[in-house]
């Protein structure tokens, strides 16, 4: 509706380092020396996101207490143009145009199977047994109340379904316990969690590979909602229009991106240790300290001078919530269309995060259209996770503009007749308003029909709005005044 579908082109980079050259070429890479990973790195990441105009990616080198060359990349995809570059989309789009382009791309995207190659740069250094030491990599202590140092925030956690054979790659947090042990937290409905549980039910450990320094495309795909049964590595190939090159993990047989910075191969055990607390993506330390499974590391592979990618959760909006700000609305929009819903004109998540407060604009076609959309969005796989409010507005409202959405709620919605509460829906143990247990993570949600009532469309008070002709005429006539002030 907004822009023509972009022609997919083959992306011009093969790994994180070539991607960094592209970002440098855009003028969006800042290099910083001498940063302290104890709290300072996270604070710097947040301030760059909040206070700079360009929101550059930050490449930290000569990190305090680490050898030169051990690097940390912060804010990888925290600008719209950097995310567009990463997802192979045009630069310079507005928020809604970005969602519209992305949904078009996702609608036609065909996964391309990852291609096995004989070796890769990831094997430049191989460590086993006593040589394994996770502390060698820059793993920040991110937030003041965290329970440890997290090596995995912008990572890939690769596992395989023991029944169905497909490999999943999800972004899940990984905290270092000791030199060859890490803790992992996976939400119960995460694909990696389901696969892990299947191994545990058979009394087996779950083979795993953690890549804490991935290509930002693989990261962006691994932290968004890719359908069950599809490998994120194949899905990323669809974005690139070329297969992702992988090597086989020597111990696990799992796919490892051939030129990724670091790959940690091992097993997730059902054995638990205290993990967290951790400052979470919604802006709270929500889960306290939990007993979570551990990863026993069997081998570490890394490139020379490896780069860790850090995407610390912060109070939204942040670099951490940025990717899904676009992917979730795009997926919801596509799912509504796939369900046969006509005339969806825009989808956007408000509050700097895409899941809690979702607004959808429609051109109303029939009585009940708005309610149907609201209920569906609140339960779609792409929208259900931790959602709390869904607002449906008419398409004269800019769905990405919070002021306009709230104006529509204030002037077109009678709460008694246009608001519904739906109870016991899918949420998360990280939901701030629930007791933090895995068994009890069901929340309620509010469906707000903020459209003009269908039966009053013709008689509803007209909006005060100048005609395009009047606007153009007055703007031309008073151009000097408007520009001078
Ligand atoms: C930076 C970042 C960190 C994340 N950390 C976690 C995490 O620690 N645990 C988790 O379950 N989900 C986490 N997520 C969300 C998952 O990556 C997301 O739900 C993804 O779809 C999981 O992949 P899956 O669908 O294959 O399970 C994170 C997302 C982002 C953007
Ligand atoms: Mn998945």
Image (spheres, rainbow, N blue to C red):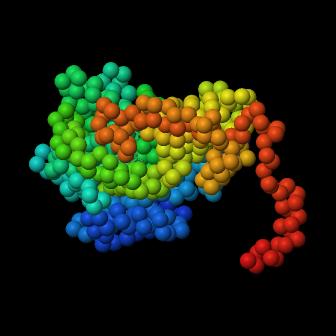
Quadrant of residue 5 in the image?
A: top right
Residue sitting at x 23%, y 23%: 201
Q: How many marks?
A: 0
Above/below status of 395 relative to 79: above
In front of the other: 123 or 329: 329
The image shows residue 456 at horizontal and vertical percentages of 77, 36
The residue at the point 85 percent across, 62 percent down is 472
In the image, 296 versus 132, the foreground residue is 296
Q: Position of residue 273 (x, y in %)?
A: 17, 42
- Quarter of the rendering occupied by the N terminus: top right
Residue that extends furthest to the bottom in the rendered view of this protein: 484
Q: Quadrant of residue 104?
A: top right
The quadrant of the picture occupied by the C terminus is bottom right
Q: Looking at this view, is 396 or 3 the one in front?
A: 396
Q: Residue at x 25, y 33 (%)?
A: 207
Judge left or right: residue 207 versus residue 166: left
Give left or right: position of 430 versus 420.
left
Instruction: Describe residue 308's horizontal placement relative to residue 30 as left or right.
Output: left
On the question of residue 13 being in view, the answer is no
Residue located farthest toward the front when viewing the structure as drawn: 416
Question: Residue, x 18% and y 38% (percent of image)?
Answer: 272
137 with respect to 18 (left or right): left
Q: Is residue 306 above or below residue 449?
A: below
- Would residue 272 be visible to someone looking at this image? yes
Indicate the position of residue 367 as horizontal and vertical percent values: 72, 28
In the image, residue 77 lies at what x, y percent?
47, 55
């Amino acid at each position: 509706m907004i822009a023509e579908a972009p022609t997919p082109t083959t992306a011009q980079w093969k790994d994180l380092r070539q991607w960094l050259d592209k970002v440098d070429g855009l003028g969006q890479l800042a290099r910083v020396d001498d940063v302290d990973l104890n709290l300072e790195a996270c604070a710097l990441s947040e301030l760059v996101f909040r206070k700079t105009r360009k929101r550059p990616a930050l490449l930290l080198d000569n990190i305090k207490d680490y050898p030169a060359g051990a690097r940390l990349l912060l804010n990888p995809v925290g600008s719209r143009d950097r995310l567009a570059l990463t997802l192979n989309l045009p630069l310079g789009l507005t928020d809604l145009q970005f969602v519209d382009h992305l949904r078009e791309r996702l609608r036609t995207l065909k996964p391309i199977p990852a291609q096995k190659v004989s070796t890769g740069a990831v094997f430049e250094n191989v460590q086993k047994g006593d040589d394994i030491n996770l502390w060698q990599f820059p793993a920040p202590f991110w937030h003041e109340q965290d329970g440890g140092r997290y090596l995995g925030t912008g990572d890939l956690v690769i596992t395989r379904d023991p029944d169905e054979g497909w490999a999943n790659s999800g972004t899940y947090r990984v905290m270092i316990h000791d030199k060859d042990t890490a803790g992992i937290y996976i939400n119960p409905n995460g694909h990696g969690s389901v696969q892990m549980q299947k191994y545990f039910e058979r009394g087996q450990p779950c083979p795993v590979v953690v890549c804490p320094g991935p290509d930002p495309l693989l990261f962006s795909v691994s932290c968004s909602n890719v359908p069950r049964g599809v490998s994120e590595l194949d899905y990323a190939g669809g974005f690139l229009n070329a297969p992702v090159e992988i090597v086989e993990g020597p111990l696990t047989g799992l796919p490892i991106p051939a030129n990724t910075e670091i790959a940690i191969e091992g097993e997730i055990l059902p054995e638990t240790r205290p993990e967290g607390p951790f400052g979470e993506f919604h802006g709270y330390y929500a889960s306290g300290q939990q007993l979570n499974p551990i990863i026993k590391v069997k081998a570490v592979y890394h490139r020379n001078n490896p780069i860790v990618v850090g995407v610390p959760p912060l109070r939204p909006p942040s670099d951490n919530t940025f990717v899904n700000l676009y992917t979730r609305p795009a997926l919801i929009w596509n799912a509504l269309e796939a369900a046969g819903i006509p005339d969806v004109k825009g989808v956007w998540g408000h509050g700097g995060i895409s899941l809690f407060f979702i607004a959808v604009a429609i051109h109303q076609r029939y009585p009940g259209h708005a309610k149907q959309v609201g209920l569906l969005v609140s339960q779609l796989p792409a929208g259900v996770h931790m959602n709390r409010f869904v607002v449906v507005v008419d398409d004269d409202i800019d769905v990405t503009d919070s002021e306009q959405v709230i104006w529509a709620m204030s002037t077109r919605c009678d709460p008694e007749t246009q608001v519904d509460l739906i109870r016991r829906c899918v949420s998360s143990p990280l939901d701030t308003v629930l007791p933090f247990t895995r068994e009890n993570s069901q929340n309620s949600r509010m469906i707000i029909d903020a459209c003009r009532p269908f039966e009053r469309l013709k008689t509803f008070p007209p909006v005060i709005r100048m005609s395009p002709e009047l606007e153009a005429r007055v703007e031309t006539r008073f151009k000097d005044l408007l520009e001078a002030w």
